Amino acid sequence: MKEKREYYIVDKRILPNSIQSVIKVNELISKLNISKYEAIKRIGISRSTYYKYKDYIKPFYESGKDKIYGIHITLMERAGILSDILKIIADEKLSILTVVQTMVIDDEAKSTILIKLTRETTKKLEEIIDRMREVDGVKEIRVTGNN
């Protein structure tokens, strides 16, 4: 029986140094168009460590063409806050599929924004989320993806 694979999105800061080093090697290979050997040498990990993990590590934006992502946001009550969030999305020319917001309870509202991203725009998602976090009144942001 084939073992079922499970996937998680985790903050790379909690990963062991060996895994982070493999990520750095893959980034060097991609950005500088250098050989695996050269990238492994620059990062300073063993070849066996790299080859042990390389097939199991990919940025989340490399898995397909178009993807639908849900951005789940807890917002403090402030006039125009949702508009500020939507402007960030519009500035990147992303497709918004739907927006749902609950009514304000205890000075907080929950919003879910479904967006459609291409492989190229998915690479910007982390930056877009960081910009949303800077909006005054954004309490929490979670991203879910499917496809």
Image: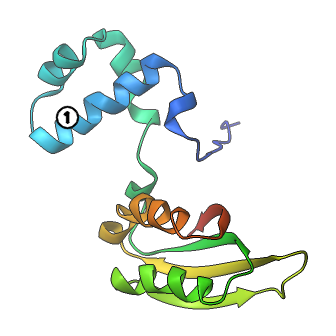
Q: Nearer the viewer, residue 87 or 145?
A: 87
In the image, residue 30 above or below residue 77: above
Q: Which residue is mark 1?
A: 28
In the image, residue 129 above or below residue 95: above
Label 1 neighbour load within 10 Å: few <14, some 14-19, many 20+:
some
- Say how the picture is coloured: rainbow
Residue at 38% over, 14% down: 49
Q: Nearer the viewer, residue 55 or 28?
A: 28
Q: Quadrant of the C terminus?
A: bottom right
Looking at the picture, how far across and down is residue 87, in whole percent?
Answer: 45, 86
Residue at 74% over, 87% down: 101
Looking at the picture, how far across and down is residue 9, in whole percent?
Answer: 58, 47
Looking at the picture, how far across and down is residue 117, in whole percent?
Answer: 42, 75
Q: Quadrant of residue 127?
A: bottom left
Q: Quadrant of residue 136?
A: bottom right
Horizontal placement of 56 versus 136: left or right?
left
Looking at the picture, how far across and down is residue 73, in whole percent?
Answer: 67, 70
Horizontal placement of 133 versus 137: left or right?
left
SS category of the residue bearing label 1 = helix
* Type of the residue with mark 1: Leu
Horizontal placement of 112 versus 16: left or right?
right
